[in-house]
Each structure stands twice: as C-alpha cells, then as structure tokens.
Amino acid sequence: MQDEVGQGTPQSTPEGPTPNAKQTRRRFPRRKRWTTIERDLRIEKGPLLAGVDEVGRGPIAGPVVACAVIMPADARAIAGVDDSKRLTHDQRVRLATKIRERAVSFALGAASVREIDRINIYQASVLAMRRALGRLKVPPDYVVIDGRAMRTLPIPHTAVVHGDARCFSIACASILAKVTRDLLMTRLGRRYPHYIWDHNAGYTTRAHVAGLTAYGITPHHRKSFCRISDLLLELEHQSEMDDLEGRALDDVGVPDEDDLDDELIADADIDLDDLEYGLEQQL
C-alpha cells in the first residue's frame, strides 16, 4: 500500500488587532519547523518510523545511494537539519555525525552504474531504497519516503512531496546519503582525476565534459546518460551551463576525507572495489 502527501500550503496566521509588534509576537508563537506528518503516522502506524531518501539520480557518473533512518519518536529534532541541498558541505558533515549518534537505526544501500544502465535510474533508485531498508537492524513500523509513491517498492509507505524539507526523518536520511555519496565520488576521483569528481560528484559541468571529450568514459560513467555529443550541445548554452555548474558546486562542496572518518562508508558496506565491479552484490 502506498499513500502520497502533496505539497500543501503553509497554515496562515489568524488575523486580528495587532496593537504593536511585541504583542503580536507574544500572541502568535512561531510556526514549527516540521509538519505533523510524522507525528500523525506514528500515532496511526507505530513509533518506529523510517525516513528514506536517495541521492544521485541526476549525475552522469557514480552510483545512486539511499539511506533509511529511524529517529527517536520522543526526542527533539536536531537543530539545523534541513533538505541536504540547502546545506553546505561542512553543515552536512557536522549534522551527519549527530544524526548517526542519535538514530535508533540507520542503514545505507546503493545501486551501481551497471544496474542503472540495465534497469533505468528510477528502478535503480527503488533498488537502493530496498537495500537500505533491508539493512536496518531495527525493523520499522512504517516507512515515509521523499517524492512520489513508488509502485515497485514492495513496502507499505507514504510518499511526501518535498519530504526532505517537510519531514525530519527524511531530511536526516537525505543528509547521510549525500555525505556518503560525496565521499565515495571524492575517492573515485583520485583514481580518475581528469573528471574532477571531487568537485562535481559526477554531475554535468564543463570540466567533467572536457574530461569525457579528452579521455572518454570510465567504468563509473552511466552509458545511458553519457552521449558526449548531447553533452557538448549543452555547452553551447553557456549561461545555462554556468548556472548548472554553480548549483552543482554549491550542492557538492569540496569533500575532504579529514571531514569524516571511514565508519560511515564501512557501515554502508560500499567501497571502491565494490564500485569497480558494479555493486552487483546485495549491500
């Protein structure tokens, strides 16, 4: 069974006499950061709610990585947690440590480039989510995912549009998945320095396309994504590419291995040798 929660609209503040700003602040408290979706689901389904999100649908290189995380139902949300795309690299790394420390359980899963090319990126994202959920050490009572309901995800779940900005547990999953994937791409970038993966995480940038033109594709490029002629056509739209590159670099940051120990990667059972052979095994 799959449910879906649309984007919705923020609740409006009741109108009334406002003698001065101080009285207004006292009378109308600040709206809470997170929606009541998770609270309502815990009441209906049980306290162990797993938030799930994936990163890496858009790049032309590297795996898609998913995370499932169960956060304590009775604890306050971690300050600063947000949709990972809205955070800097340093903020994500700092928050990832706090999330891991406080989580009831978390797990990561991935789908390889070979799997992406074979079954398409949508099905590969579902596969990565299934692997992450299957590796949780504490079985969840229910699952909430970011985006639209996935018919091929054989686990009852509620999908929340823009869930990584509306549900705390999904935002936590988003941060862990992104920190993991960025670090993986940084390490792969040392083996293939011509593509600048330590800066672009496999996304389409001018430097990445220049590497493809000069050196061709690697085993970690998505062949179904990498028609170089099409990528070169994109470069003709200079302003669009400038905007795309800027967003990609703001999103990725410059990962540094000193920022994060090896424990998170070890927990994911993902290493470079696995990636070389396509992550065909179950994680």
Image: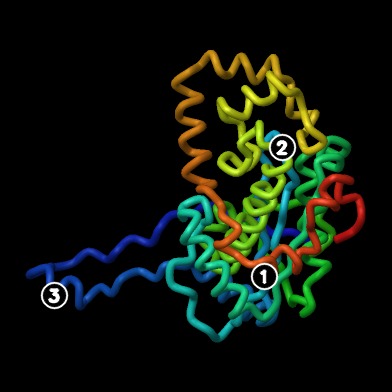
* Residue 94 place in picture, x, y as percent: 50, 67
* Tag 1: amino acid: Val
Which residue is nearer to you in this view: 79 or 148?
A: 79
Residue 218 location, quadrant:
top right
Residue 276 lies, with reference to residue 117, above or below; the image says: below
**Type of amino acid at the residue the image marks with label 2:** Tyr
* Image point (69%, 19%), residue name: 214
Judging depth in this view, the residue of 209 and 223 nearest the camera is: 209
- Give the CA separation, mark 2 to mark 3: 60 Å
Q: Earlier in the sequence, mark 1 or mark 2?
A: 1
Q: Which residue is mark 3?
A: 23
Along the viewing direction, whichever of 231 and 187 lies nearer the viewer: 187
Q: Determine the CA span between mark 1 and mark 2.
A: 32 Å
For mark 1, give the secondary structure. strand
Which numbered mark, 2 or 3, is in the foreground of this view? 2
- Choose between 150 and 216: the one closer to the eye: 216
**Looking at the rendering, in which quadrant would you find the C terminus?**
bottom right
> Which of labels 1 and 3 is toward the front?
1
Assign a secondary structure to mark 3: helix
Q: Which residue is mark 2?
A: 192
| Quadrant of residue 53 within the rendered picture | bottom right
* Mark carried by residue 69: 1
Vertical placement of residue 89 versus 107, above or below: above
